[in-house]
Image: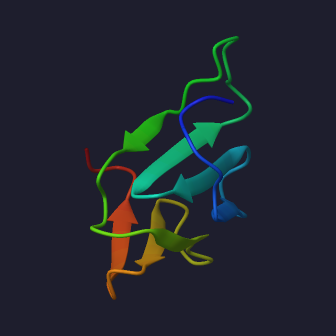
Amino acid sequence: MNGLTEEGFALNWNLNKKGLIGAATGTTICLWDVEKLDEAGQPIINIADSHENTINDLKFSIKNENIFGTASDDHHFKLWDIRTP
């Protein structure tokens, strides 16, 4: 899979949406739908500069398949909705 340029710290499977995986490295978040990967393996969502410092964790909601959260060394926790660009 493509999208991340460095070693990732955060990796999480979405338990409610089959095939959706998320990972983060540095300040970049990528989401892939492994059920629909093309040969290039490009992410379906790529959010660069999502935090001001290194992302340490990414977790999908267990209640809503479209929500995930990230935590960073910038002392912020952010909630994301994949339905919103």
Residue 41: x and y in percent read 65, 22
Most foreground residue, 14 or 71: 71
68 relative to 6 in the view: left or right: left
- Residue at 58%, 45% in the rendered image: 6
Residue 8 visible, this orientation: yes
Q: Quadrant of the N terminus?
A: top right
How far from the left and from the top, in percent, is residue 15? 73, 64
Quadrant of image for the C terminus = top left
Give the vertical position of 17 relative to 15 (above or below).
Answer: above
Residue closer to the observer: 7 or 43: 7
Q: Residue at 36%, 65% (x, y): give it.
A: 80
- State left or right for residue 73 relative to residue 62: left
- Choose top left, top right, bottom left or bottom right for residue 24: bottom right
User: Viewed as shown, does residue 1 lie left or right of 61?
Assistant: right
> Looking at the image, which residue is at 51% across and 45% down?
30
Q: Up-down: is 35 above or below 77?
A: above
Left or right: where does residue 46 sit relative to residue 33? left
Percent position of residue 16, x then y: 67, 62
The reply to whether residue 14 is visible in this rendering is no
Considering every residue shown, the one lying at the far bottom of the view is 75
